[in-house]
Amino acid sequence: MNRPRKVTTLGQFIIERQRDFPFAKGELSRLLRDIGIAAKIVNREVNKAGLVDILGSTGRENIQGEDVKKLDIFANEQFIAALTSGGECCVIASEENEEIIPIETEISKNAKYVVMIDPLDGSSNIDVNVSIGTIFSIYRRKSLGGPGTLEDCLQAGTEQVAAGYVVYGSSTMLVYTTGRGVNGFTLDPSIGEFCLSHPEMRVPETGVIYSINEGNYIKFPEGIKKYIKYCQEDDKATSRPYSSRYIGSMVADFHRNLIKGGVFIYPQTQKSPNGKLRLCYECNPLAFIVEQAGGKASHGTGRILEITPTDLHQRTPIIIGSVKMVEQVEDFLRQYPGN
């Protein structure tokens, strides 16, 4: 008789791995659990969003100049509430808020951690039932006591102690790293728990998928245009032409490529010469994850994680995914430096 497979929940896994962080004394573990709980609440609302008045626009824009959706606000409020009440972080920075959110509760005055979060990535897809997600990263604070500061938030990606994302799709998955590999957990709605489903995730060294918004082709740097044409050429030796796959939610495109292999590219354009995606809320956490999974993340001429941010909402170009594909894009940019 086959024995039932042991199920490991996110909470159990975090406790088991707590020994990897003897300096943390459980705070990081509790912080990750707080994020997991908030993600389950957001997932519940995402699943029933079509049935209640939570879809659609609020009629205002966020700091990025983008239309704010009602579900964006709900997700932002849930994560802020969970992180504030948990007492494990001293400051939160959210893509939805112009300024940092220092936590001034008594329980948080000696908190050790900083959380940077994109509460609902891909929100332009909310109304059409396409996968969206949450992206987060965690740093150790630099300041000494009291509420956290802007300095605590403006750290290079190399200083992250943990990062992760949640994909709200056909199934809901939470993927995270604490610098010791990448593990994925799928939400089992029957028991309301994230269960380990993808242990020790590794991105294939190369792949046959490229993800880029080709509608902006005319505005891309010459090296990116040349790479796209390379992907479309017929060559059996290199399994070309590659498949073009672009969802429009970075977290969903990244998740697919992490599992199947591929490269996601969001370059600078004539309209956005510094790139469009946010360094602190999107690029740094996903770069940390992909490197832990054996992949690579570049801004075109260097490592994403080595950028020291000077602004909370700083943007950057990004090339991320399978290491050989990322390096090939970098080669094209070197060969064809023109705009």
Image: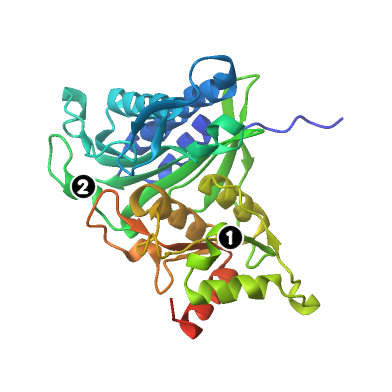
- Give the percent coordinates (x, y) of residue 87: 27, 27
Q: Which residue lies under the disc numbered 2?
A: 152
Residue 9 in view = no
Residue 23 in view = yes
Q: Secondary structure at mark 2?
A: helix
Question: Label 1 neighbourhood size at 10 Å, few (<14), some (14-19), many (20+)?
Answer: few
Which of the two residues, 226 or 149, is positioned nearer the viewer here?
226
- The residue at 67%/71% (across/down) is 231
Instruction: Using the numbered discs, state the Cα–Cα distance from disc 2 to disc 1 in whole angstroms.
Output: 37 Å
Q: Is residue 328 above or below residue 268?
A: below
Q: Quadrant of residue 127?
A: top right
Which of the two residues, 227 or 110, is positioned nearer the viewer here?
227
Mark 2 touches mark 1? (CB < 8 Å): no
Q: Quadrant of residue 244?
A: bottom right
- The residue at 61%/70% (across/down) is 228
Which of the two residues, 164 or 300, is positioned nearer the viewer here?
300
- Give the percent coordinates (x, y) of residue 286: 46, 52
Residue type, mark 1 in image: Glu
Dividing the image into 4 quarters, which one contains the N terminus? top right
Q: Which mark is residue 273?
A: none
Residue type, mark 2 in image: Asp
Image position of 138 (left or right of 12): left
Which of the two residues, 11 or 312, is positioned nearer the viewer here?
312
Q: Residue furthest bottom?
A: 335
